Amino acid sequence: MRSIVRTFEEAVIKDIQKITNYNEIEWNKVYLNGGEIDFQDDIVDVIFYVNDSNDKNKYKFWYDYEIKQGGLYIVGLDKNNSEELTVLWTNQIID
């Protein structure tokens, strides 16, 4: 069972990399252990982590496969210790 989960995680990571074409993340250091994947119809939400220079950085990715829009964010903390998203990549249509 573990190999099926690992194969699925690798496919999700490759899909994020392909969609965003974002190369500032060391994709070989990405892991989903402790993260989450949520599917709702054509929309996927993924929380993942990257080990960068002994730091564990948290990222959020969402994508709507039907309308082909989404975003990639690094998750940090603001001065009130609330999560703050910094945009790394997006292809959203803004009105």
Image (tube, grey):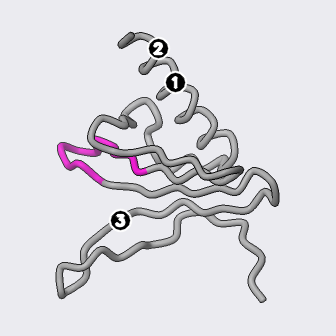
Left or right of residue 57: residue 88: right
Going 36% across and 13% down the picture, which residue do you hit? 2
CB contact under 8 Å: marks 1 and 2: yes
Residues at marks 1 and 2, CA–CA distance in whole angstroms: 6 Å
Instruction: Tell me: residue 4, above or below residue 51.
Output: above
Secondary element under disc 3, as helix, strand or loop, is: strand
Work out whether residue 8 or residue 92 is closer to the camera in this orientation and state it: 8
Residue at the spot x=52%, y=55% of the render?
61
Residue at position x 40%, y 55% in the image: 59
Badge 2 amino acid: Ile
N-terminal-most mark, 3 or 1: 1
Secondary structure mostly taken by the magenta-highlighted segment of the chain: strand
Identify the residue position indicated by label 3 in the image: 75
Compute the Cα span from label 3 to label 1: 23 Å
The question of residue 75 being in magenta is answered with: no
Q: Position of residue 50 (x, y in %)?
A: 34, 43
Which residues make up the magenta segment? Answer: 47-57
Q: What is the crowding at mark 3: few (fewer than 14 residues within 10 Å), some, or many (at least 20)?
A: some
User: How many marks overall?
Assistant: 3
Residue 8 is marked as 1
Residue 31, image x, y percentages: 36, 35
Residue 50 belongs to the span the image colors magenta: yes
Residue type at tag 3: Val
Rendering coords of residue 30 (x, y %): 39, 37
Please tell me the numbered disc located at residue 4: 2
Quadrant housing the C terminus: bottom right
